[in-house]
Image: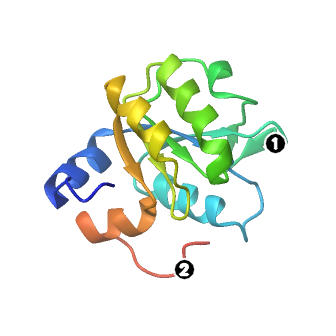
Amino acid sequence: MTGQESQEWLARLLQECRTIAVVGLSSNPARPSYGVAAYMQRQGKVVVPVNPRETEVLGAPAYPALSAVPGPIDMVNIFRRSEEAGAVVDEAIRIKAKAVWLQEGVIDAAAAARARLAGLQVVMDRCWLKEHRRCIGSEGGDVRR
């Protein structure tokens, strides 16, 4: 997030994006990606795992790349290192995702600018779960549940 977006804008984005591809989603319950994606599912989101090392995560088939995902994606949530985020953002632009969300610690200002120029909504260096709880409110507790 650049600081220009309001809490209302963020809440609307969190509510409107129903199908979320989670790039880097792990089947390991101890990983942050697993906890955040499990929370997304509990909020009624369709989670699409994207990880070439996985076959299924959270009961959903995993895909090796965004381009392999059948059907439209509303948001691409990126759990990759900052230096890998740009390629994922470029792929999100190619598949015509509506938004990209770079998780906490994932920062690539050039990729974010490319996404915005392509018409995507962008959130950077923020945790989807924390922002959902802050803007919309929901269940508390351990994110790994």
The answer to whether one can see residue 74 in this image is no
Name the spot of residue 128 as percent of width and height, x first: 43, 59
Residue 136 image position (x, y, % from top left): 24, 63
Pick out the residue farthest to the right.
Answer: 53
The dot on residue 142 is 2
Residue under the image location 41 percent in, 79 percent down? 140
In this view of the protein, can residue 99 be seen by the observer? yes
Q: Secondary structure at mark 2?
A: loop
Reply above or below: 10 against 35.
Answer: above
- For badge 1, the amino acid type reads Glu
Q: Quadrant of residue 16?
A: top left
- Amino acid on which disc 2 is placed: Asp
- The numbered disc on residue 93 is none
Secondary-structure class at tag 1: loop
The residue at which mark 1 appears reads as 54
The image position of residue 133, as x and y in percent, is 33, 69
